[in-house]
Image: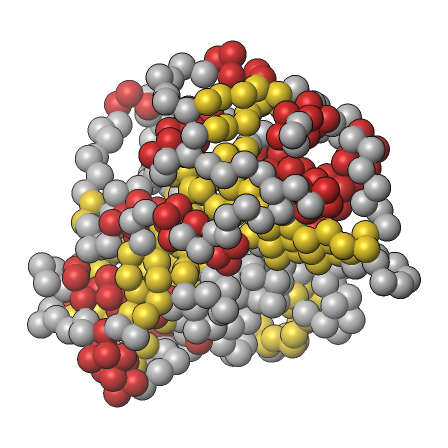
Amino acid sequence: MAGKSKPKTIFACQSCGYQSPKWLGKCPDCQQWNTLAEEVHHQTAARSPAVTTTSQIQHLSDFDAPKEVRYSSGMSELDRVLGGGFVTGSLTLIGGDPGIGKSTLLLQCMSHLGSSRKTLYVTAEESPHQVKLRADRLKASSEALFLIAETSLEKILDHVRRFKPAFLVIDSIQTIFSEELESAPGSVSQVRECGGRLMQLAKGEGVSTCIVGHVTKDGAIAGPRMLEHMVDTVLYFEGDPSYPYRILRTVKNRFGSTNEIGVFEMGEEGLREILNPSEIFLEERPEKSAGSVVVPSLEGSRPILVELQALVSSASFGTPQRSTIGIDHKKVSLLIAVLEKKAGLPLMGQDIFFNVAGGVRLDEPAVDLGVITALASSHLNKPILAQTVIFGEVGLTGEVRAVARPDIRVKEAQRLGFKRCFLPESNLKNLQTSCHIELTGVRHVQEILDKIFEN
């Protein structure tokens, strides 16, 4: 029989899973500092199992594709990012900053699902009394919503197999531990083991499972990235603490499209869905103010109109300041250089502050042209005409390139009453839409500046 050998101490990187026999200050694999933690492993004596083949090779057409069974979460915004609701036997990972609303979202969701099917909420961080107080505040009670406070993986799996819930929530994966491992909860080996066995439970028992995951200071899910590879769906809950709005973004979905977003507002009674986020983000937009422009950003299949704000002023002394909120700092610096070189605007010696209003974060190239015009508007102190939207990608030579789905961007702008739209010339040629909005195509950044600030 195989037995356990002498315990072995190793040092594992908590970021990527790299293992070393000794402690290192810097991980050689992911280049992160101070991420190696000590773990104790019991090595099982090696044995040579008999090789038996029970599986058979079959043609793909011989397999029957079962119909997906989905259940609505009770929130249309959450259903949107999931691709239509929770799939039976799926494993979903939800990450976000502390206090962003992950537990609140799942408690509200489970309350709705519990009205028709049995749900089990495993709290490994809070006491049942704390969860009960939150549920009362959210008015999220249900006769079929059950709760247990447990951190042992083996006990949780035993409860699930006996109780047989249709939906399971684990809050959170970093606090769950397997008794078969001696490493601390949240370590690489514990996260790997717990994630793998919860996946087997979800697939084997047909239990739709949601896992809450902690995030690092950089905003990524804490622990090795293999946890994100294991699960079926990965959702990130984002938001600026200064604003009440929260954005639920999907970055992986085996049952639907990726990069979809859902918008919520955090209030005293929990999360409220925002069905028309464009109107919310633009309701306080100032009129006739230099440095302000509206861009239609595409999040998955959903167009959202957001306001970009730029402030360009003379540098008082020393190196000019550069500050950006809601958009990549390097992207803005690149576009500043394009304006300086290709449009002749002297911006390198100016203090520049850039902001995406409403706490939204933009990362698609279609907002480049909006950034260019906002910077030029603030520098020239000339406001952009009201009811104007702008979108397009900008290259290093100043050319304006085509972007994806210009039709739904234009339709969203028209729906909110905008009268004028600047877009790439190549998009205008292929745009098949009957809109009551003035469309102006541009090919270069100098061309759009001449047309916008011609007066």
Q: Can you name the residue that lies furthest to the right here?
A: 318
Q: Position of residue 98 (x, y in %)?
A: 47, 72
Q: How is the image coloured?
A: secondary structure
| Residue located at (78% from left, 31% from top) | 343
**Relative to residue 363, is residue 186 depicted above or below?**
below
Image quadrant in which the N terminus is located: bottom left
Quadrant (top left/top right/bottom left/bottom right) for the C terminus? top right
The residue lying furthest to the front in this view is: 455
Compared to 332, does 27 lie above or below?
below
In x, y percent, where is residue 22? 75, 72
Q: Does residue 395 appear to the left or right of 110 in the view shown?
A: right
Foreground pick, 260 / 33? 260
Q: How many marks?
A: 0
- Looking at the image, residue 452 sits to the left or right of residue 321; the answer is left
Residue 341 as seen in the image, left or right of residue 252 = right
- x 46%, y 65%: residue: 243
Q: Nearer the viewer, residue 5 or 393?
A: 393
Report the residue at 26% width, 73% height from top: 269
Q: Is residue 353 visible?
A: yes
Whether residue 82 can be seen here: no
| Residue at position x 80%, y 29% in the image | 342
Give above or below for 383 relative to 171: above
- Image position, residue 238 (x, y; %): 47, 59
Left or right: residue 291 compared with residue 211: right
Residue 414 screen position, x and y as percent: 37, 31
